[in-house]
Structure formats: structure tokens, C-alpha cells
Image (cartoon, rainbow, N blue to C red):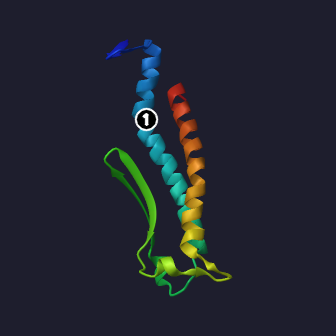
Amino acid sequence: MKIKDGIVTLEMSDGLREMVDRALAESGQVTLSAMEEVLDEVFNSAKAAWPEVTGKSKKSLRKYIRRDGKQIVVGITNDAPYAYMIRVKRQPRRRVWNELVSKPGKKTSKKLARQVGRDLAKSIAGK
């Protein structure tokens, strides 16, 4: 197969084209599965450790997954109006939201990227 666009020409064997087509077809599901796994991990950990201030903030903790055009968006929210102000009991300068949701979410982004890469490689290889 030969693809030409302007001055650039790309030539692929049928085997390579099949691998690329398979990767593109499966990449959305692979990515979504990995994102759900990481989201569940952060959410369950945060929910288990969330302090019982009034009980309302813990019940208001929610996770979501939505497709926004070509993007997959995952996240955790807390609908309690004061949730962002709750502080860690023994470390009053730290906020619970940052310690239990934001920081773990940022740390898992590298793990997610590695996992998606491995899963896509398996998908391309046909495993």
C-alpha cells in the first residue's frame, strides 16, 4: 500500500497495514479499560480514607466517565459545597481533596501511560 500526501510518500506492507488497522480499531477500548482501572483505584482509595465530617461530603464523592468528541474524560467530583475546604486532621495545612484525589490522580498518570502502551503493543501483536 502506498500513501502520498504532498511531498511525503509512505509505503506499507499488507502485514504492517493490518497491524496499524487493528491498533486503531482497538485503541479506544484499550485506553478506556486502562482509564477505568486507574479511576477505580484512586476513587476507592479516596472513598475509604475520606473523613466523616458531616457524612454528606463522603456521600457526595462521585466518579464519572464520558466521551467528549474524540476524547475520553474520566474524573472524580464531590458535590458538597465545602468539600474542597476539608483539611487533613493531623496536618491542618493540607486539604483532603488534594491528598486523596489530586495527588494520587497525578501519580497514576504515568502508570496509565505505561499500561496503555503495553496493552496497545499486545493489541498490535494480536495477543
Figure label count = 1
Q: Which residue occupies 45% across, 30% down?
A: 23
Q: Which residue occupies 61% across, 73% down?
A: 49
Q: Position of residue 58 (x, y in %)?
A: 50, 78
Q: Position of residue 5 (x, y in %)?
A: 32, 18
* Residue in front for this viewpoint, 28 or 90: 90
Picture quarter with the C terminus: top right
Q: Position of residue 81 (x, y in %)?
A: 41, 80
Q: Position of residue 17 (x, y in %)?
A: 42, 19
Residue 29 versus residue 93 in the image, above or below: above
Residue 64 versus residue 4 in the image, above or below: below
Badge 1 crowding class, 10 Å Cα cut-off, few under 14, some 14 to 19, many 20 or more, is: some
Question: Looking at the picture, which amino acid does disc 1 mark?
Answer: Glu
Hey, which residue is sitting farthest front in the picture?
7
Residue 111 versus residue 56 in the image, above or below: above
Q: Which residue occupies 44% across, 56% down?
A: 74
Picture quarter with the N terminus: top left
Q: Which residue occupies 62% across, 79% down?
A: 93
- Which image quarter: residue 26? top left
- Which image quarter: residue 50? bottom right
Hey, which residue is sitting farthest right in the picture?
90
Q: Secondary structure at mark 1?
A: helix
Q: Can you identify the residue that label 1 sits on?
A: 26
* Residue in front for this viewpoint, 72 or 88: 88
Residue 84 shown left or right of residue 68 in the figure = right
